[in-house]
Amino acid sequence: MTPLIETVFGLVFIFLCFSLITSWATEYLASRYQYRARMLHKFLSDALDDRFNAKNWGLVLYSHPLIETLGREVTKFRVFNKLGIKRRLPHYIPATQFATAFVESVLAHNKESVFQRDEATGKHVLAVEESSAAEDPFPQFVNAVESMHESEVKQTLQALIRNATAAANPLDAVRAGLMTWYESGMERVSGWYKRDTRTRLFMMGLVVAVAFNVNTFDVLHSLWTNPQMRASVAKAADAYLAQNATLPARDSVRNLDTLKARIAEVEGMLAPLQLPIGWPDAESSASDAGVVAEEGRAWRLPTPGEVWRALKKNWIGWLATALALSFGAPFWFDALKRVANMRSAGAASRAVPTGGVPPLR
Amino acid sequence: MPFYNCHIHIFSGQCAPKRFLEVGLPGWLDFASGGIKSFLETSMGRGIMGFLAKRKSKSLRVMARYGSFASIGTKTSQQMVFENILPFYPSGARFVVLTLNMDYMGAGDSELKFQGQIDQVVALRRKYPDACLPFLSVDPRMGTVDEIEAFVKRYIGVETGGAKPFVGVKLYPALGYFPYDARLMGMYAFCEQHGIPIMTHCTPSGSFFLGKLTASMGTPTTINNAPAHQFGKGDNAAECDAFLLPEQWLYVLRLFPKLKVCFAHMGGWSEMWPDAERNRQLAGAPSWYQKVLNLMAAFENVYTDVSYTLAETKVEKKNGHRTWHEIMKLLDSGRTPYGVPAWAAPPGGALPTPYANTLHQRVLFGTDYFMTEQEEPEADLAVKLSDWLLRQGRRDLYTALTETNPEWYLYSDFYKPWTRVQEQGLARNTGGGLVRNGTLAGAEEVADVPPSPTQVSGMLG
């Protein structure tokens, strides 16, 4: 059993290492291209699209200051204004801010904006609006909703109004209703994001498998037939578990330099083990297309020609690797710990006692 | 007196339908317009569009023109697009911001929808009440004549304590309607009565209706017995020129002679210079540019603007900046180098031109930001023509183009520009607001005559 467990242990450790790279790269791209923020944006845009009132309430919300300021980041690149503030989509909107911004947007639906000429300067200014702090805004909210054309958004708001009329503070009750709606929507968005992440992990896993030439079957074969390699991989895995009680935070890779540094750390761990991973230092001129020399492998990006020549022999192995990596680093970290426990239990049961009960014959 | 840019766009990609880019794509790429629009949001996409904009091929440049819209418009909000232009202009400058209802152009719905676009522009005006002067886009397919009139009155007019947020109306007939559509009649009457300015696109290039051109689109109920139009078998880009022809406006202007209309782009750069980039022979017929000048000569409140025509600077350099010379001559004498050509056979009969001597008072400065961004950055467009005029020693023409003429264009019962009201030149015309005298604006220095308190309160309604 030991060689089998050791082989599995080694394979799981290798999968863990590359799934870390996959997860980091996926997370870096998700952050760079705002996948979470876009998914949230799409959800609100689709759910609050009101064609009968010719308005997308979701998109209108994003220009409300309560939401818009959530997406601001300070940047050294002064692209659109002199303040050096870069605007991005917010990747998370607190429910209270969503509800408040939505109520404000509905109140603004019916609001008149009036402009006057300032006789002192000749410039046009917004007319001073009477403060309505003392007024109950709920009737204005109801009027604004009633003034809308019939639509799903109007019906939803009318339902919230009906539920709120008996409350002591009806507008707060409407906000609470909106928060509940929003939070249930966020649960669905989280589910969609997880499914989307799985797909992206698979695609990135495929890229990693090809980029680092990680053929699952080649690795498995090498571990099974080479005891020294198996032992050195197990030793590296034990050292990793001793140093890392948990995985690094998922969102710790925010820029390309950090990603490169992390990849270099993994390379530092695996390169001395002389695994059948990576591309040859010099392009192989072997007549048997797709055969990669065992000696002189390096962690470098392949040329398209190399990939094409290796494709026929390795595509199944690469796909298997991609499938494995799509399970994610937490899965393989847990798996590594379990196999490590199995190894420990197996070693303990094989230990010869120095005294006490003699072994059974 | 503030500087005016009478023609800018700030709509973001959310305001445009997903298939909007089909106006600039070759037909075989239409299926991918949505994906291309998304690609143009990336840095690589913008870089490619910038490269295409400088190519010689007209179709590539047309594609790049819409790419500039996508690359600027999709990445930002309307407010950001507006704020991006402010640094290129003097402090206190005012901008005519043209909304555009693209929900009927046969390219599907926009994400934001038109009401959302309007609401954002109103919110922008609240932040920039003096700099942002929005025009309300109107499309006859929005409703009946009464509904359209009510829609316009909802946003343009007087409210308790002041004026409503919009100061003019924008029309873009190439999106699928004729200007003489009877559903616009109530709006025209309202605009003529109160001197509300209208801006209409008037050049063969630009956006156009992307759906199927049906016979009924050629035969709407019309104002003034305008004839039915039969569409040919050409592509929409060519057929939709029929909506834009300057002569279509004769049916409107003969019924509403004091209507204040600006024919943007001077008919188009390619129409100004028939030897350049023309795909059809004039065969003795007047160009769109000549027709626009005739309309200006025939009707006292017809204007034009120089937007987009300024952007053809590459070709212009080779031709000694002839467009700038043309504009200067128009501003100077009200006459073009070719004289004011008589329109031989306008629909409805001969066109008297009693206002031929005041063309110079009705030329406006505009840039068509951001549609020209890939060809000529706004930072350059904003200053090139005006700098050139100043170098020619014609500060008076610069003032007329960028300050005086726009004020007269924008002036209405509901919007009063900075008070440089010339009492000697004022005549209240019950049909259409203020009328200028026949003097050459800009050539004379007219003393500032501040309005009396009675005038002020009257102006504010």
Image (cartoon, helix red, strand yellow):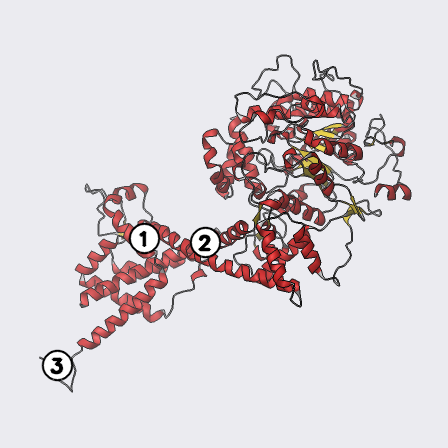
Looking at the image, which residue sits at the far bottom? A356
Mark 1 and mark 2 lie on one chain; the one further toward the N terminus is: 2
Query: Viewed as shown, does residue A43 lie left or right of B436?
Result: left
> Are the two marked residues, 3 and 1, in contact with CB atoms closer than 8 angstroms?
no
Q: Mark on residue B455?
A: none
| Placement of A180 over or under A311, stated as above or below | below
The amino acid pointed to by label 2 is Ala
A354 left or right of A128 in image:
left
Q: Quadrant of residue B260?
A: top right
Residue labelled with disc 1: A322
Q: Earlier in the sequence, mark 3 or mark 1?
A: 1
Q: Pinpoint the chain carrying mark 3.
A: A
Instruction: Answer above or below: position of A319 versus A92.
Output: above
- Residue where numbered disc 3 is placed: A359
Mark 2 → mark 3, Cα distance in angstroms: 57 Å
Q: Secondary structure at mark 1?
A: helix
Which one is nearer the viewer's eye here, B359 or B170? B170
Residue receiving disc 2:
A30
What is the spatial separation of the Cα atoms under label 3 and label 1, in whole angstroms?
A: 46 Å
**Viewer can see residue A62:** no
Mark 1 and mark 2: Cα distance apart in space: 18 Å
